[in-house]
Image (spheres, helix red, strand yellow):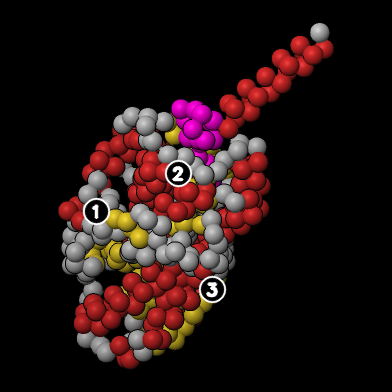
Amino acid sequence: MKRIVSAIMMCFLMFLSACSNGASGDGDSETFKVGALFPLSGGLALLGEESYRGVELAVEEANKNGGIAGGKQIKLVKGDAVDADASQSEANRLINQENIKTIVGSYSSSISFAASEVAERNGVLYWELGSTSDTITDRQYKYIMRTNPSASFFGKTHVDFIKEVVTKKLGKELVDLKVAVAFEDSAAGPPIADAFIKFAKEEGINVDTKIGYNPASNDLSSVILNIKKAAPDVLVAISYLNDAILLARQSEELGLKVPVFLGSGGGHTMTDFKDGAGNLANGIFNVDFPQYAINREATPGMEEFIDAYKEKYGSEPRSGHSLTNYMGMKVVLEVIDKTGEVDPDKLKEEALKYTAKPGSTATGWGVEFDAKTGQNILGQAYMHQWIDGELKTVWPEAVAVEEPQISNQ
């Protein structure tokens, strides 16, 4: 009798094991499980949720179209990474309790940095779809891939725009421009500021002022007064949403007028910035991922994305972060489709073969991953400007819908 019971128990355990492994996508189930690690609550939730929505829409689209790899459905297993510590614990939970073999994320560079370390230690492939810090891929980890452009791409876009557009609009030579940089000093701001300054120096641009600040501060008057004293022609500001609004409002109160204000991703992109800053938003530039007032011929698939977003969430997209994550997740799904499984090594091998030409994706980017770093080298940041309450793409010309508006007065 004991032998019969033991045999039954052994069969039952083997059945449970097969179910668990199959849910991870090893070929024994009709479902692939993919971890999705984003800040879905807390201070970073606004753009964290917006980023996750892009991933969710890409998965729903694939599932509605019959799935991938012969009809398998994709199941997202969420992890709420409110900060770096939570990202580590959530990554461990996804890997060790949910048996996840590949994870996508994460919007925040500090979250991505911490979570990808956990993934690397466990041999799990981590796909970064939205955070920009160069250090994420500069570590040359085996199990990291990034579909979006890094901070260096943002810094170079700033410098190229100043060189090719601002100098002509202001009627000044590069060496005569006075430039200031103000940045939130968490994980995201310093890398973008450093990349900009590095490229600026290479071009002979004089960066007179560099000021970091706490993004949680409720008073940026000292930052603004220092900028006002420096009297720059160009201000590069790297901010989250609340500090971007505060910077705009207090600059108006303290009489800071800068001929060219260049935001960099984050807060200056969102419709919430326009709502919070009102008319003060008009004229402000922003280097960021693709937004929606853009040349649609250069971004095939964007119309379909916007329609799907409005149908599911009942509003226009709040930021280009959802689009960027949608595009990145589509790359992930295509790689899984070609591999037919979620084995990290096989996914990495297939990803390095994957290519897409610029102008063939909903963001307008191409795709080609660097073998050493896992960075997509064909991503690009674009220059946008708030014009009459709408964030319009103004540079480069291939994706622009309007001329940059800069007065030399």
Image position of 154 with respect to 296: above or below: below
Quarter of the figure with residue 311: top left
Quarter of the figure with residue 402: bottom left
Q: Which residues are magenta?
A: 22-40
Which of marks 1 and 2 precedes in the sequence?
A: 2
Work out whether residue 249 can be spotted.
no
Badge 1 element: loop
- Dot 2: within a 10 Å radius of its alpha carbon, few (fewer than 14), some, or many (20 or more) residues? many
Badge 2 element: helix
Instruction: Return the residue at label 2.
Output: 52
Residue reaching furthest front? 3
Image position of 231 with respect to 52: above or below: below
Quarter of the figure with residue 280: bottom left
Residue 378: image location, x then y, percent = 33, 63
State how far apart marks 2 and 1 are (Cα).
22 Å
Q: Specify the quadrant that holds the C terminus.
A: bottom left
Q: Nearer the viewer, residue 86 or 221?
A: 86
Residue reaching furthest top? 1
Q: Is residue 33 magenta?
A: yes
Kind of residue at disc 2: Tyr
Residue 373: image location, x then y, percent = 48, 65
Instruction: Return the residue at label 1.
Output: 360
